Amino acid sequence: MIRKTLLAAFCASAVLILATPVSAAQPQQMKSEEGTVEVTTVTRGLEHPWSVAFLPDQQGMLVTERSGNLRRVSPDGKLSAPLSGVPDVWARSQGGLLDVVLSPDFKRDRTVYLSYAEAGKDGKAGTAVGRGQLSEDFKSLEDFNVIFRQQPKLSTGNHFGSRLVFDRDGYLFITLGENNDRPTAQDLDKLQGKIVRIYPDGKVPDDNPFVGQKNVRPEIWSYGIRNPQGAALNPWHGTLWENEHGPKGGDELNIIERGKNYGWPLATHGDNYSGAPIPEAQGKTAEGTEGPHHVWQLSPGLSGMAFYDSDRFKAWQRNVFIGGLVSKDLIRLEFEGDKVVHEERLLGDLGERIRDVRQGPDGFLYVLTDEGDGALYKVGLK
């Protein structure tokens, strides 16, 4: 009788453990300048996740995997099967399924925007953006259609960008890498190394800075960009901020303005990976170009970026958080006005490449790690 009772108790405990959501796991605690940081695993088993977007009304999150899957993470941390209706992606090297954002009017139109690497006819690829409607059962994207294509297609696997950001007026900004073809970032007849601004349906606004100019792509908002891996709208000023990888050294944080040239490859704080100078570079500055707002001489491998504007953790208010792929940490920046005055590195104990960081509706930070067994973490102060 005693053995049967013990066995029943053991089985009940095992069932309880198996049924416990991943998100109920005990948080890891890590020291920081502002107190103890608690890191809770929301879910694991993601294949090189790239971006996360929050569904309204506590319906969970959408997460992209670079291999081409879009998945839903339920509020209790359960990972769905891949959604159907997602476009085929060119999943090689840095290419694949990249950013995901919701329409500003998602509650009405259920529209989801995706950026991804799209194959060309000659074995090369470029960044594309499309949109579809999320089904009520969260299992598919319906009526997906492409609204933007980077032309020409020049990438053999590198420097696609790309982040998607809606501004306060509903315009969509797309950040585009130069496909590791440096001079194209200065060529205004190409969409490499650019930030473009379009309407949500892909049409070009008449007030874009280069509209009507001969041999210039009208989508272009700014140019001279290398490989933009993070972008976010400043919630206090409504300005677009962007970060990008330098070559060997010289990762940049930029405040993006209409029609401005951000210098690459004419100006850079880095060198070629061989250690040789960038052939086109005139130095750290070049006439007619904008210098970086902030620069890292030793590259962290910048990735996703988030402004913190919640009241939940007052010590983080008006900070900016940026993921580090190479440094394997979360960078916290403090400001006086728009000037960076202090930097702290967090989450280094995880030892994982950080691909994306977003502020959740609950005021916590949510962090994706770029690993074969990638994780989604919930991060806050104790």
Image: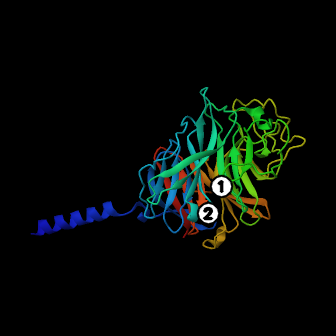
Residue 106: x %, y % from top left = 58, 62
- Tell me the element at label 2: loop
Q: Which quadrant, please, contains the N terminus?
A: bottom left
Q: Nearer the viewer, residue 300 or 66?
A: 66
Against 200, is 190 above or below? Answer: above
Residue assigned mark 1: 305
Residue assigned mark 2: 105
Q: Amino acid at mark 2?
A: Asp
Quarter of the image holding residue 219?
Answer: top right
Q: Nearer the viewer, residue 341 or 140?
A: 140
* Left or right of 43 in this view: 379: right
Tally of numbered tags: 2
Residue 2: x %, y % from top left = 12, 69
Q: Answer yes or no: do the residues labelled 1 and 2 have beta carbons within 8 Å? A: no
* Left or right of 27 in this view: 259: right
Q: What distance separates the C-alpha of mark 1 from that of mark 2? A: 22 Å
Residue 250: in sight, yes or no? no
Q: Residue at x 60, y 73 (%)?
A: 312
User: In terms of sequence position, does the residue under pointer 1 or pointer 2 come before the other?
Assistant: 2
Quarter of the image holding residue 379?
Answer: bottom right
* Left or right of 316 in this view: 4: left
Residue 57: x %, y % from top left = 52, 69
Q: Amino acid at mark 1?
A: Met
Q: Closer to us: mark 1 or mark 2?
A: 2
Residue sitting farthest toward the right: 287
- Tell me the element at label 1: strand
Classed neighbour count for the residue bearing mark 2: other residues with Cα under 10 Å, few (<14), some (14–19), many (≥20): few
Q: Nearer the viewer, residue 223 or 20?
A: 223
Residue 49: x %, y % from top left = 52, 48
Q: Which quadrant, please, contains the C terminus?
A: bottom right
